Image (cartoon, rainbow, N blue to C red):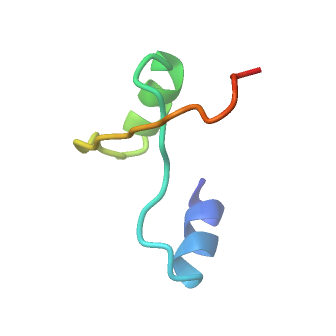
Amino acid sequence: MAAAETWLTRRGVRDMLIVRETNTAVVKFYDGLAYETVPRTVMQKWLVPSP
């Protein structure tokens, strides 16, 4: 993860990562790496039926 974060930072990426809150294992993983939960609203509209 450190290498990935360094790579992104060098390319001007300031933040990253969207994880579904129901994916508890991944949330726990990133929480252990000092990632923090921030309030966001994600909206979608299916323009075609989902597969």
- In the rendered image of this protein, does residue 20 appear above or below residue 42? above
The x and y percentages for residue 25 are 51, 19
Which of 29/45 is in front?
A: 45
Q: As drawn, is 13 to the left or to the right of 35? A: right
Q: Residue furthest right?
A: 51
The answer to whether one can see residue 15 in this image is yes
Q: Residue at x 63, y 62 (%)?
A: 4
Which residue is depicted at the point 51% across and 82% down? 12
Q: Position of residue 50 (x, y in %)?
A: 69, 22
Residue 32 seen from this side? no
Give the tally of numbered discs: 0
**In the image, 29: left or right of 7?**
left
Residue 51 left/right relative to 26: right
Tell which of 3 and 22 is nearer to you.
22
**12 over 46 or under it: above or below:** below
**Residue 30 on image: x %, y %:** 45, 38
Q: Quadrant of residue 39?
A: top left
Furthest toward the left, the residue is 39
Along the viewing direction, whichever of 13 and 40 lies nearer the viewer:
40
Location of residue 34 with respect to 32 vertically, above or below: below
Work out which quarter of the rendered image holds the C terminus and state it: top right
Question: Relative to the observer, which residue lies in front, 39 or 35?
Answer: 39
Residue 45: x, y in percent?
50, 34
Q: Residue furthest front?
A: 47
Q: Quadrant of residue 27?
A: top left
